[in-house]
Image (tube, rainbow, N blue to C red):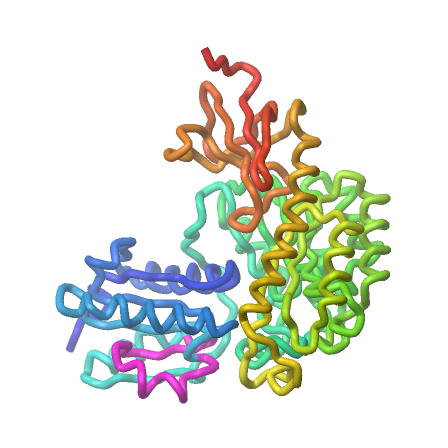
């Protein structure tokens, strides 16, 4: 019999930060079983590829990654295990075709990992999708830099946006137990920045009958090892007075909200089955800035949704001017089978969608640049993320910059320690990043 746990395991995580947390929990399963984990795929005997399937481009990346690494089977690699969203949603279509992979596991099947792998070593390709128990685990091997970590507080989604596959992949919204999440956060050790994620963090607890985001924020910020908490993916219709007050009054909560709007024009929002509308969004931003003057607001938007007119793109560009958001992401609409929007008439060529994305990015670029210019000559509290060797300086983030999705602060200092805060004098900016130095640094 093959001693599977004596094998050397490598892991590749694709997709979002929520997927990253799933990968970290799988790594903890490996570690708890005494397995050796390597970050060099070339030395791995078992390679796990945790996949995303939200968009066609993500599915393409997942399949190409499996094929790319399958060439290592001529060397040390013995098995490829494909986990996550791709097999969860598309096992029937991909298992027979993607023969480079030996094991398929879905999003809820990590407790069956060794059973599936053992069966594979007996000589079969195996599809274990749907065999797991979806039991919550708080054990993790953190893969982010040591000073920040993500905390996934829920899985699934009840928001039936017409363009989105998440409910079909991840199922209905399920809040993880609060006590378990607090214990998980406490076991992360000293964390400068804890980043709360879910498909919709603002609905935390509603599936259990009570809105509990503020309650878990209070519990998390009471932990001595958690220096600050950042909120991602807050739906606009769920940002109420209680949450606004908690963000304003709790010194450990970063004054930053990621509010995915997807569009501004009411007709398109209705077709998307999205909440609220243009004027309510602007009213929400006005209220947030009145209550929390320093609040930074980020959002994402989809361009080229079916039947979207040039006038509605003009409307979205005008909305950006009125909203004055700190950071934005823009994406071309992706027509996904098994979504309601797939059947809509008025689908448009990718070239048109790409052109609209480019236009919206240009509009936001001017807004972001002017906002960043306001910091020139001022001193910002910056969390050091490490060294940028290409730029030959330290790199970090101010409170209005979340990791990986927003800009950065590049700075010179006599010394700086990853995970510590420094006071940085901002000297210049471009459209996305700030540049400066600490007060004791002398360029000469």
Name the image quarter holding the N terminus: bottom left
**Which sits in the foreground, 320 or 222?**
320
Residue 401 among those drawn in magenta: no
The answer to which image quadrant residue 174 occupies is bottom right
Q: Is residue 350 left or right of residue 289?
A: left
Q: Is residue 96 magenta?
A: yes
Magenta segment:
88-109
Q: Position of residue 184 (x, y in %)?
A: 53, 55
> Given the current orientation, which residue lies at the most extreme left position?
75
Residue 78 at x, y percent in the picture: 19, 71
Residue 220 visible to an observer of this rendering? no
State left or right for residue 393 relative to residue 285.
left
User: Image quarter for residue 330?
Assistant: bottom right
The residue sitting at 67% across, 44% down in the picture is 366
Can residue 362 be seen here? The reply is: yes
Picture quarter with the C terminus: top left
Front one among 43 and 63: 63
Residue shown at the point (63%, 46%) measured from the top left: 365
Q: Position of residue 433 (x, y in %)?
A: 56, 38
Q: Is residue 180 above or below residue 174?
A: above
Residue 384 pos. (x, y %): 51, 33
Which residue is painted at 66% across and 36% down in the image? 372
Q: Residue at 66% of width from left, 65% of height from top?
A: 200
Compared to residue 398, the image places residue 61 above or below, namely below
């Amino acid at each position: 019999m093959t001693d599977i746990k004596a094998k050397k395991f490598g892991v590749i995580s694709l997709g979002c930060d929520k997927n990253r947390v799933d990968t970290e929990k799988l790594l903890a399963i490996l570690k708890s079983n005494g397995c050796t984990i390597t970050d060099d795929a070339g030395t791995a005997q078992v390679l796990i590829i945790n996949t995303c399937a939200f968009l066609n481009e993500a599915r393409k990346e997942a399949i190409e990654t499996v094929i790319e690494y399958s060439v290592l089977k001529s060397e040390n690699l013995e098995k490829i295990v494909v986990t996550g969203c791709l097999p969860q949603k598309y096992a029937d279509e991909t298992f027979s075709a993607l023969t480079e992979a030996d094991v398929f596991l879905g999003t809820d099947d990590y407790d069956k990992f060794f059973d599936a792998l053992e069966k594979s070593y007996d000589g079969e390709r195996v599809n274990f999708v749907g065999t797991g128990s979806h039991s919550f685990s708080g054990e993790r091997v953190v893969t982010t830099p040591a000073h920040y970590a993500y905390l996934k507080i829920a899985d699934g989604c009840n928001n039936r946006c017409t363009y989105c596959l998440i409910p079909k992949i991840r199922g209905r919204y399920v809040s993880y137990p609060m006590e378990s999440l607090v214990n998980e956060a406490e076991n992360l050790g000293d964390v400068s920045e804890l980043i709360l994620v879910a498909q919709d963090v603002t609905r935390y607890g509603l599936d259990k009958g009570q809105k509990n985001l503020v309650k878990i924020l209070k519990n998390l910020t009471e932990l001595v090892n958690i220096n600050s908490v950042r909120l991602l993916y807050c739906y606009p219709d769920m940002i109420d007075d209680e949450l606004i007050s908690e963000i304003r009054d709790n010194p450990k909560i970063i004054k930053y909200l990621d509010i995915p709007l997807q569009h501004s024009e009411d007709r398109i929002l209705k077709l998307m089955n999205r909440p609220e509308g243009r004027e309510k969004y602007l009213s929400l931003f006005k209220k947030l800035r009145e209550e929390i003057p320093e609040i930074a607001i980020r959002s994402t938007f989809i361009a080229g949704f079916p039947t979207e007119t040039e006038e509605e793109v003009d409307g979205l560009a005008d909305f950006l001017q009125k909203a004055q958001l700190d950071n934005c992401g823009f994406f071309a609409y992706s027509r996904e089978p098994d979504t309601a929007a797939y059947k809509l008439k008025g689908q448009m060529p990718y070239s048109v969608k790409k052109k609209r994305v480019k236009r919206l990015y240009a509009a936001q670029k001017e807004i972001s640049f002017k906002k960043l210019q306001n910091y020139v000559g001022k001193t910002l509290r910056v969390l050091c993320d490490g060294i940028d060797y290409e730029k030959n300086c330290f790199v970090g983030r101010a409170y209005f910059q979340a990791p990986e999705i927003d800009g950065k602060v590049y700075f010179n200092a006599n010394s700086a320690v990853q995970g510590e805060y420094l006071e940085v004098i901002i000297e210049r900016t471009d459209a996305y990043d700030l540049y400066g130095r600490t007060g004791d640094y002398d360029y000469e």
